Image (cartoon, helix red, strand yellow):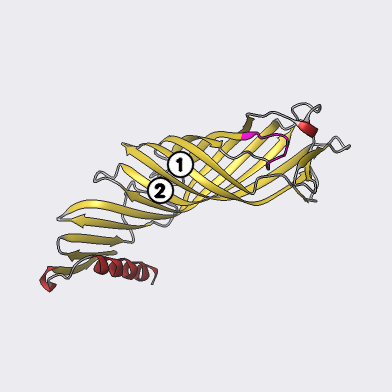
Amino acid sequence: MKKTSILFVFLLGLFICLPAQNPDELQISSQDETFSLNIAGFKINFDGNNGKSTDSCRSKKEPVTLSIHENGIVKSRISFDLIGPIYHGWNNLVQSEYVGNWQGHGDFLEPQRAFSFGMSFCTLSVSLNRQRSLRMNFGARWDWTRFYYNQPVVFHVDNNNHLFPVFPAEQRKLRMFSSYMGFPLGISYHYHGVRVAANISAEWLVGSHWRYKGDKDKLKAEGFNKFRSAVELIIGYRSLGAFVSYGITPMLIKGAGNQAHTLTAGFVICLDSDLSF
């Protein structure tokens, strides 16, 4: 039913855009799980199982792919992946400078450890050339980060929406968490298993909290920017890759006293050897 709906929408748009054609130029064929349609020299394949294509990163289920042909030559291929690559990284703060109420306490925002986890899903990939080596990618991604700070600190916002630090008297290890949902848009180049990709993303804060290590009680963490943007570069081979990401938007809200940006580096892994960034 899902395949039929997608095919119907695509064909409707095709018939609107194309002029009226001779009925003799229309041919329909079906074999296994592939449905083919020929219209005036254009051949469209709708595949539910496309074998060992290198177009996308797949989970156990194969992605839906759509190929557009002209006179037997593949013009473009569109693939859709439900689950994409998984990201593991470590965060550092750059361009950090304290002013106002933040001064006099040392570099307390420097994380002792900051682990980041991300997962892409619902990724749409469109080939931009006949060789399918150049592709444009768009999808969604969820990122989760856990911070350990050298000095326990929590953030509070005053009536003027300014952030000021509060240092708990209890010197216990404190952990702070944040999660964002974003939509990266990028372009990738593939050559014999080697892939290079560049992305830019817009992300919105899903939640943030802090708690002492060993405690179950969570308290809302204030001060994180509700919107952020980032640029990213990925280089990989088959199912493994390395990435570096820079936060264009400061980590904390405006007027916080520190406009530090995040710099994240780590690796990318996919459950299938056919990796698409």
| Identity, as a three-letter code, of the amino acid under mark 2 | Asn
**Disc number for residue 249:** none
Image position of 235 (left or right of 161): left
Question: Where 184 sits versus 35, above or below?
Answer: above
Q: Quadrant of residue 60?
A: bottom left
Residue extending farthest front: 160
Q: Earlier in the sequence, mark 2 or mark 1?
A: 2
The quadrant the C terminus occupies is top left
The quadrant the N terminus occupies is bottom left
Residue extending farthest right: 169
**Disc number for residue 199:** 1
Q: Position of residue 139 (x, y in %)?
A: 46, 52
Question: Where 247 sits versus 128, above or below?
Answer: above
Q: Position of residue 4 (x, y in %)?
A: 34, 70
The reply to whether discs 2 and 1 touch (Cβ–Cβ < 8 Å) is yes
Image position of 27 (left or right of 108): left
State which region is magenta: 254-261
Q: Position of residue 63 (x, y in %)?
A: 38, 56
Q: What residue appears at the point 88 percent right and 37 percent down from the top-left corner?
A: 170
| Identity, as a three-letter code, of the amino acid under mark 1 | Asn
Kindly report the secondary structure that dominates the magenta region of the rendered protein.
loop
**Disc number for residue 137:** 2
Q: Nearer the viewer, residue 70 or 61?
A: 70
Q: Nearer the viewer, residue 41 or 204?
A: 204
Q: What residue appears at the point 31 percent right and 66 percent down from the top-left corner?
A: 10
Categorize mark 2 by other alpha carbons within 10 Å: few (<14), some (14-19), many (20+). many
Image position of 62 (left or right of 28): right
Residue 256 drawn in magenta: yes
Q: Quadrant of residue 175?
A: top right
Q: Nearer the viewer, residue 239 or 13?
A: 13
Residue 141 drawn in magenta: no
Q: Helix, strand, or loop for circle 2?
A: strand
